[in-house]
Amino acid sequence: MRYELLYQPSFSVARVLLEPGQAIRAESGAMVSMSPSVTMESKSGGLGKMFGRLLTGESLFQTTFTATGGPGEVILAPAAPGDIAAVDVSAHPMMVTSGCFLACDPQIDLQTVASGRGFFSGEGLFLMRAYGAGTMLVASFGAIHTLQLQPGQPYIVDSGHLVAFSEGMGYQLRKAAKSLLGTVTSGEGIVVELTGPGIVHIQTRTPSGFAAWLGGLLPRG
């Protein structure tokens, strides 16, 4: 996949350049514009995959864009303002949190995975596992901050800020503070302790936090 990430980090779009016969698979409704040489086809992938995408907060259908009449381009954007990051899953699968998938090479498979530990309690119990050969584009609310954790290195992330992380990383769900009162009064709720080695992508804002801030500005009564 050849691509450019433009207008980062607040209103990012991905400009994907396709050679004749090349294709890219994207979330339904992600297309901003495209060349006349590009055709689009929407598919569900079957009832099982539709149900899995519903659980992970993705659209029920995905669209494949193919350059059929010569080279062309497709410009893709997420629904919310924020950043886009390119993730290579060829060497190692990635786990993607709810609503953060944007697009990928057609050779990449997407699988819905339920967390046996109640992962992301209050944020969604299902993750998307991306594996195969190629590049995946993930989207965030706000900018994306990327970390490379070394073997055995722990790091704590608020569950609502996590975008994607390397499969196989250690993780532990716990309260933000030692006491229940401290957790409630801190406003942080549940956090995830990840342990390297692996890559972690974090979003600098959350939709829930923005909604709460916006709600405080609305007139009452």
Image (spheres, rainbow, N blue to C red):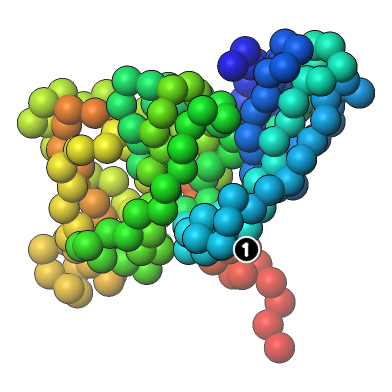
Q: Foreground: 219 or 27?
A: 27
Residue 178 pos. (x, y %): 11, 63
Q: Foreground: 218 or 150?
A: 150
Residue 88 pos. (x, y %): 42, 22
The residue sitting at 26% across, 55% down in the picture is 191
* Lateral position of residue 205 relative to residue 182, left or right: right
Residue 208 pos. (x, y %): 51, 61
Which residue extends farthest right?
A: 36
Q: Foreground: 209 or 71?
A: 71
* Lateral position of residue 133 relative to residue 49, left or right: left
Q: On the rendered image, what quadrant is the C terminus found in?
A: bottom right
| Location of residue 162 (image quadrant) | top left
Residue 60 pos. (x, y %): 63, 58
Tag 1: Cα neighbours inside 10 Å, few (<14), some, or many (≥20)? Answer: few
* Looking at the image, residue 52 lies above or below residue 150: below
* Lateral position of residue 218 relative to residue 189, left or right: right
Kind of element beneath mark 1 = helix
* Looking at the image, residue 33 lies above or below residue 78: above
* Looking at the image, residue 53 lies above or below residue 169: below
Q: On the rendered image, what quadrant is the N terminus found in?
A: top right
| Location of residue 180 (image quadrant) | bottom left
Residue on which disc 1 sits: 214
The residue sitting at 27% across, 71% down in the picture is 184
Q: Amino acid at mark 1?
A: Leu
* Lateral position of residue 58 relative to residue 196, left or right: right
* Looking at the image, residue 120 lies above or below residue 198: below
Q: Foreground: 184 or 125?
A: 125
The residue sitting at 27% across, 59% down in the picture is 115
Residue 202 showing in the rendered view: no
Count of numbered marks: 1
